Image (tube, rainbow, N blue to C red):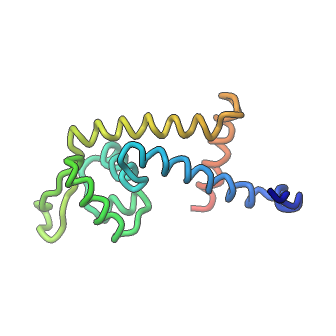
Amino acid sequence: MEETPERLTAKPSWLLTQLAVHAHRLASEGFAEAGARGYHYRILATLDEFGPASQVEIGRRGNIDRSDVVAAINQLAEQGYVERSPDPGDRRRNVVTLTEAGAGQLRRLDRTLDKVQDELLAPLGTGDRETLTRLLSQLLAHHQ
């Protein structure tokens, strides 16, 4: 394996990109083992946290493209994890609701993601993990 130039490895942007690729792979593999995808987790977590919502709201809150939201909600509805019903205030749109089975799947996916986090952050102690999370949150908030 070729060595990476020190000039690159000293750049936080390069390090974040490399780590993001690795984190995404670990999460995708973990979700796949649980029969899910990242979009499924984001949708279920959004519904759990904010309650029933339109597909547009779910996409906005979960940072998911509209076309991907529709496809993922279709998959989740087929599995019985969410239900769609017409919005009483606007019959042109649907309201999506988390089912009890969906809440159970979310708990399974949370455990999966916890394992992924532990693997990803294995070299760091609790204090360092908290510091990393705080710093990354601060950077993300600044750029949003």
Q: In the figure, is residue 142 to the left or right of 55?
A: right
Residue 121 placement (x, y as % from top left)? 65, 38
Which residue corresponds to the image point at 31% horizontal and 40% vertical from the top-left?
105
Q: For the N terminus, which image quadrant?
A: bottom right
Residue 37 placement (x, y as % from top left)? 40, 53
In this picture, is 90 found above or below 80?
Answer: below
Q: Outermost residue toward the top?
A: 126
Q: In the figure, is residue 77 to the left or right of 7?
A: left
Which residue corresponds to the image point at 31% horizontal and 43% vertical from the top-left?
48
Which of the pair 133/144 is nearer the observer? 133
Residue 15 placement (x, y as % from top left)? 74, 55
Q: Outermost residue toward the front?
A: 1
Q: For the C terminus, which image quadrant?
A: bottom right
Which residue corresponds to the image point at 60% horizontal and 37% vertical from the top-left?
119
Residue 18 placement (x, y as % from top left)? 69, 56
Which of the pair 10/144 is nearer the observer? 10
Total residue callouts = 0
